[in-house]
Image (cartoon, rainbow, N blue to C red):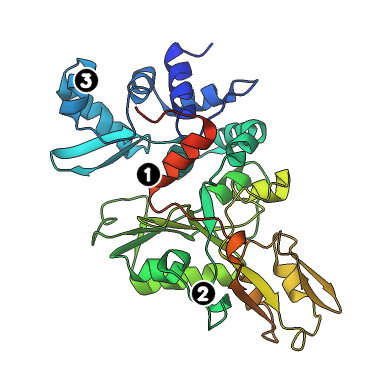
Amino acid sequence: MAHPAYHALARRLDELPNGYPATETGVELRILERLFTVEEAELAGKLRLTLETPNELAARLGVEPRPLMGTLIGMAKRGLVKAARVPAGWGFGLLPFVVGIYEMQGAWLDSDFARLFEEYYQQAYASVMLAAPSVHRVIPVDKAVRVDMEIHPYESASALVEASQAWAVVDCICRKQKALIGDPCDHPLDVCLSMSDTPGAFDRITSMKVLTKDEALGTLRRSAEAGLVSTVSNNQEGLTYICNCCTCSCGILRGIAEFKMANAVARSAFVNQVDAELCQGCGLCEDACQFEALEVEGTAIVNAFRCVGCGVCVLDCPEGALALVRRPEGEVLPVPVTEDDWRRERAAARGIDLSE
């Protein structure tokens, strides 16, 4: 039976807007046992989303700060808590399970952990993805958007890369996880981009491969050519990563493919449009679409409800008959401005009190 510290941490993680729902088999507790010692679980369960220094945390918990600092640093190195510079030094806070703790486990992912995650995914993650606003948002391939269409910076992967000062790439944990349970896909692994406003931000992180700006832009091009869909956190400001995903492996996009949940990811503000005079009905776009949003009946026909506005199919059209255009205003969900805005909206939708 799991120690009470794991039960308490699981409840605390489910109190976050992202969610960490319980299962009938208790696999969520076995995952935490795999990741945290009892001491670490007890500490993590008392952390806040806002960053606290070890001195602040020690004063709140009534413990000595020096040993607390060592424990927090060790947990941060293993991706179990978030850590960042604050005016008084280093601050530490609680990470959600997804997106957060799980994505930081690439270096320690093995077949046993992959099977645990799959069990949890199948039992619990439909309920996580049902909540609004969605965790992730699709951003289109820049070249797929019609030239007379305005693209906001938060809607453009290349604009996000251009505006950053440091870039790095890691292997996609979703495709690693599926391969470890014997269900691999053929899409490339090394395509998950991280970005920072701080030059050299990734230089000392051994689990990441540091890139130049041109290399980061090249990773975007390579991902699009491989048919991958770019997604980011569902807010406008402070975007720090670009996932390049597929419905065969991505934990979020699989929600559309496996659970038939159209809102598993927030679609972009764009929708595909076909120029019937140019379309030759070759079917290449239908093959490229991972969301069954295209059907060829003489010419290609777009199912606007299924289309997520990624633009991947546009690149595969040899006739240039496809392009992304802005959806009607009433069909576009507003994107929360900041991550805090997203948390407040998500917490309200789930009936969660964020006061702690």
Q: Quadrant of the N terminus?
A: top right
> Viewed as shown, does residue 29 lie left or right of 317?
left
Question: Marks 2 and 3: in contact by CB < 8 Å?
Answer: no
Q: Nearer the viewer, residue 14 or 284?
A: 14
Query: In the image, is residue 252 above or below residue 3?
Result: below
Q: Quadrant of the C terminus?
A: top left
> Viewed as shown, does residue 356 lie left or right of 307?
left
Q: Nearer the viewer, residue 247 or 330?
A: 330
| Amino acid under disc 1 | Asp
* Residue receiving disc 1: 340
Q: Nearer the viewer, residue 82 or 151?
A: 151
Question: Marks 3 and 1: in contact by CB < 8 Å?
Answer: no
Q: Is residue 105 visible?
A: no
* Residue receiving disc 2: 142
Residue 101 image point, x, y percent: 43, 38
Instruction: Please identify, in this view, whether the residue under mark 1 or under mark 2 is nearer the observer.
Output: 1
Give residue 87's quadrant in the image.
Answer: top left
* Residue receiving disc 3: 60
Q: CA distance from mark 3 to mark 2?
A: 48 Å
Instruction: Write the residue at 48% across / 22% down.
Output: 11
Residue 49 image point, x, y percent: 34, 34
How crowded is the residue under tag 2: few (<14 C-alpha within 10 Å), some, or many (20+)? many
Q: Residue furthest front?
A: 330
> Viewed as shown, does residue 34 lie left or right of 253?
left
| Residue 315 circle label | none
